[in-house]
Image: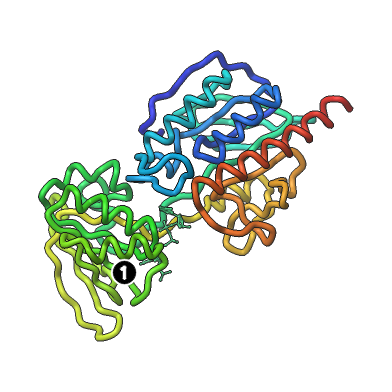
Amino acid sequence: MSRFKLVFEKIKNKYDCIVVGAGPAGLTAALYLARFNIDTVIVSKDIGGKMAIAPLVDDYPGIADVPGAKLAELFTTHVKKHGVPMIVGEAVIKVKREGDMWCIETEGGRKLCAYAIILAIGVEKRRLSVPGEDKFIGRGVSYCAVCDGMFFKDKVVAVVGGGDSAFSSALHLSTIARKVYLIHRRETFKAMPHYIEKAKKNPKIEIITNTVITEILGDKKVSKVKVKNMVTNEEKILNVDGVFIEIGSEPPIKFLKSIGLELDENGYIAVNPDMSTNLPGIFACGDIAGGRCRYRFEQIITAAAEGAIAAKSAYEYIIRVKIK
Ligand code: NAP
């Protein structure tokens, strides 16, 4: 079960559309569906998805420097204004066809059906897969700087990764911790130049390139990491109190395959330009969507735009199916 409190609203068994996921894609889809007068429910394990754990968002037009959690709240309030019910705190574990409807089952045993489903479930954080990682989750190993950063006040932490998530986490942690190592396996970074420049100028952040963590060590809590330079093969120990793993994300392939969805070579749902999938009535948007027709650019604004397109396509599909 997720750490989110289960929100009970007046929930029926049947809707026109079920939106699974409440990140920027799912919330925008629900907003547009409500405006198309489509009877919609949102089912999600959390609210805001990755947006809610972004330390600071400065690339959503019109709202400069807004904490991700605040932006998620603004999205949610807007959806609620249109009266869309939400079940929050329960992941969807099954999606299957029943007659002319798609039905979902949640981990709490709830069953709901609808003519169309919009999957906006996002992706799962990638694990580093080194010794000590599993042992110290919640005891120094974290995947969320915004959620856990406050436990490292005046301490020393390491952030692993070279993308926007690693850099934004390192910058956020530098406002709390005494020192932040940013450890990346290459010389160059995927992150935006804006983040890289800010981190390089930050006296609390030490960037270590061409280096991987080979082991996370400690007794009851993390106290050290063993690192290896990939160029020189030199190994050394860094004393740290925490390790933040920010090395990207992966789609839940097993779950997607269980529905019968066509996936791309990386396991994302293959979508058409209108966000439809190989299964009539199932649409996908946001980070979980992939395929040759989708240009990957995982941003809040692109997720929201795809949510709007998915809603329009689902609306047209539902109208066709209902008047048959
Ligand atoms: P990402 O862009 O995929 O970057 C993942 C990083 O982790 C890469 O530098 C990668 O190294 C490294 N990595 C992957 N597997 C690793 C492993 N096993 N061991 C060590 N390092 C590993 O993921 P992300 O940073 O989470 O970002 C995901 C998407 O969200 C991106 O499109 C990003 O732009 C977006 N995002 C945007 C913002 C924003 O402020 N606008 C903030 C966060 C995320 P390599 O470089 O060697 O592949």
Q: Amino acid at mark 1?
A: His
Which residue ends up furthest to the right in the rendered image?
324
In front of the other: 115 or 112? 115
In the image, residue 16 lies at what x, y percent? Answer: 71, 25
**Number of disc labels:** 1
**Residue positioned 51% across, 25% down in the render:** 87
- Quarter that holds the N terminus: top left
CB at disc 1 and ligand 1 closer than 8 Å: yes
Residue 286 appears in view? yes
14 sits to left or right of 25:
right
Question: Is residue 46 visible to the viewer in this orientation of the structure?
Answer: no
Q: Position of residue 250 (x, y in %)?
A: 49, 55
Residue at the far top: name it.
Answer: 10
Q: Is residue 24 above or below residue 171?
A: above
Q: Position of residue 294 (x, y in %)?
A: 64, 57
User: Is residue 8 positioned above or below 116 on the image?
Assistant: above
If the image is split into quadrants, where does the C terminus sit?
Answer: top right
Quadrant observed for ligand 1 in the rendered image: bottom left
Q: Is residue 206 left or right of residue 294?
A: left
Q: What's the residue at 53%, 46% (across, down)?
A: 301
Residue pointed to by mark 1: 184
Choose top left, top right, bottom left or bottom right for residue 130: bottom left
Residue in the foreground of this view, choosing between 296 and 88: 296
Q: Residue at x 74, y 32 (%)?
A: 315
Q: Is residue 53 above or below residue 19?
A: below
Above or below 167: residue 318: above
* Percent coordinates x, y for residue 311 in the rendering: 67, 36
Q: Quadrant of residue 198?
A: bottom left
Image-quadrant location for residue 43: top right
Q: Secondary structure at mark 1?
A: loop
Q: Residues within 10 Å of mark 1 (few under 14, many from 20)?
A: many
